[in-house]
Image (cartoon, rainbow, N blue to C red):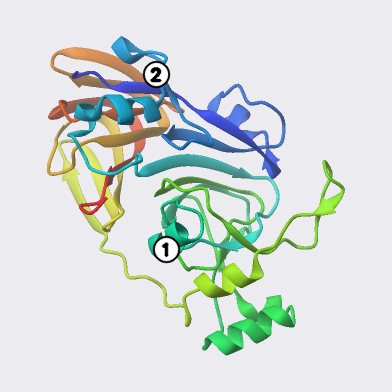
Amino acid sequence: MTEPLFLQPYFQEKIWGGSRLASEYGYDIPSDHTGECWAISGHSHGPATVINGPYKGKTVTELWDQHRELFGDAKGDVFPLLTKILDAREDLSVQVHPDDAYAKEHGGELGKTECWYVLAAEPGAEMIYGHHAQTKAELTEMIENQQWDKLFRHVPVKPGDFLYVPSGTIHAIGKGIMVLETQQSSDTTYRLYDFDRVDKKTGKKRELHLKQSIDCTNVPFTEPKLNRKDYTVGDAQVTRFVSTKFFAVYKWSLTGGTAVFKRQEAPYTLVSVLDGQGEIKIDGQSYPIKKGVHFILPSAVKEWQLNGNLTIIASEPGQEA
């Protein structure tokens, strides 16, 4: 199998979602409060579906379970990565995710370390990223007394920024921001604060998870040091933003010309086209690609050529995934 597995995303409606997934990427979204495009997903809450080739109609989950050879016979009960595009018309809740050990003990999922590549941000847009408490006792006191302005750390962002969000990091994507998110395949979120807003569907405030949030939060917050690396592959500018035991994330930028990539150690590669159009060529066969297209390069694809004007985020499983 040396052709890309092109995917139909799964869409999630959210209280904070908007309509930019349609206006920016041309997706057929379920409503004008669609918050998440689960673009490359093997998660049971929203698996993506193959739309080409011999596996057309199969979900990523089914391929992982039935055709592990596509993924280099990688280990693990679940497909380990999840790629999303998020459209935050309003602020997301302030939340924290557990690590693998806590998640397994309290629900059986993977933990959730994630990262964001900022696609769009209105002027003045910012993330909540980290906190100012120095001890667990101080964290608990600030939460109990609802000292949110004192607790939360705010970071302005602009398109092209990259933030790494390890499990245990208090965070929230702010109003007016779109991101491409690469994460462990988990849907476990502990909501710490939700701006006291009411869900119109239920007429009630959404549930908070204060104990779990306190349990999981890393104290004190330390901004992670990224092992960023910039280099060229043919005519492409490449940035490796981060490489961890969970995933490695890259940006491939091609403005005309050609770039030939060769598989290194990773058994498969996840690819999301963020802008432009062009083609990917594998074993002499060309496949047109453009903004909004997502696909997996299975393990049998050892080399691929990109042509055109393309901005891509690609990811690979970490060495321990």
Q: What is the quadrant of residue 1 in the picture? A: top left
**Of callouts 1 and 2, the N-terminal one:** 2
Kind of residue indicated by mark 2? Lys
Is 140 or 262 nearer to us in this picture? 140
Image location (x, y in percent) of residue 225? 32, 70
In the picture of the structure, the residue carrying the numbered disc 2 is 58
Is 23 or 74 nearer to us in this picture? 74
Task: Give above or below for 11 relative to 281.
Answer: below
Task: Give above or below for 247 relative to 223.
Answer: above
Secondary structure beneath disc 2?
A: loop
Q: Residue at x 63, y 51 (%)?
A: 122
* Mark 1 Cα shell of 10 Å, populated few (<14), some (14-19), many (≥20): some
Kind of residue indicated by mark 1? Asp
Task: Give above or below for 129 relative to 307.
Answer: below
Q: What is the quadrant of residue 165 in the picture? A: bottom left
Q: Is residue 99 visible?
A: yes
Image location (x, y in percent) of residue 260? 15, 31
Secondary structure beneath disc 1?
A: loop
Image location (x, y in percent) of residue 61? 39, 30
Image location (x, y in percent) of residue 304? 17, 27
* Mark 2 Cα shell of 10 Å, populated few (<14), some (14-19), many (≥20): some
Q: What is the quadrant of residue 54 in the picture? A: top left
Q: Residue at x 56, y 43 (%)?
A: 86
Is 30 or 308 nearer to us in this picture? 30
Q: How many marks do you count on the picture?
A: 2
Q: Is residue 166 visible?
A: no
In the picture of the structure, the residue carrying the numbered disc 1 is 99
Report whether 287 appears left or right of 152: left
